[in-house]
Amino acid sequence: MKNSIRTLREERGLTQGALAERLGVSRQTVNALETGKYDPSLPLAFKLSALFAQPIDAMFDPELPEESAR
């Protein structure tokens, strides 16, 4: 799943470690989120939404396969 977490984090001058601390997760989790290797749980998605003052659907793109988008 594509997302804009890295961009939002960098715009606010946060390190992965600082973001992880604010979210209550590990730095490795933040890295996995940013690289698309991990999809956040719903509670974590809401924390990200609140922290960045962005709607969840503005931060995440589910990359639906073309056939299911019809």
Image (tube, rainbow, N blue to C red):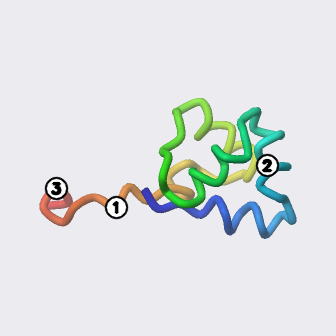
Q: Which residue is mark 2?
A: 19
Query: Which type of secondary structure does the marked residue at label 1 adopt?
Result: loop
Upstream in the sequence, badge 3 or badge 1? 1
Q: Amino acid at mark 1?
A: Glu
Q: For the C terminus, give its image quadrant.
A: bottom left
The residue drawn where x is 64% and y is 54% is 31
Q: Which residue is mark 1?
A: 63
Separation of disc 2 and disc 3 at Cα? 34 Å
Marks 2 and 1: which is nearer the front?
Answer: 2
The label shown at residue 68 is 3
Residue occupying the far front of the picture: 28
Residue 12 placed where, x, y %? 83, 63
Marks 2 and 3: which is nearer the front?
Answer: 2
In the visual, does 8 lie left or right of 63? right
Residue 5 placed where, x, y %? 64, 59
The residue drawn where x is 54% and y is 60% is 35
Residue 69 placed where, x, y %? 20, 60
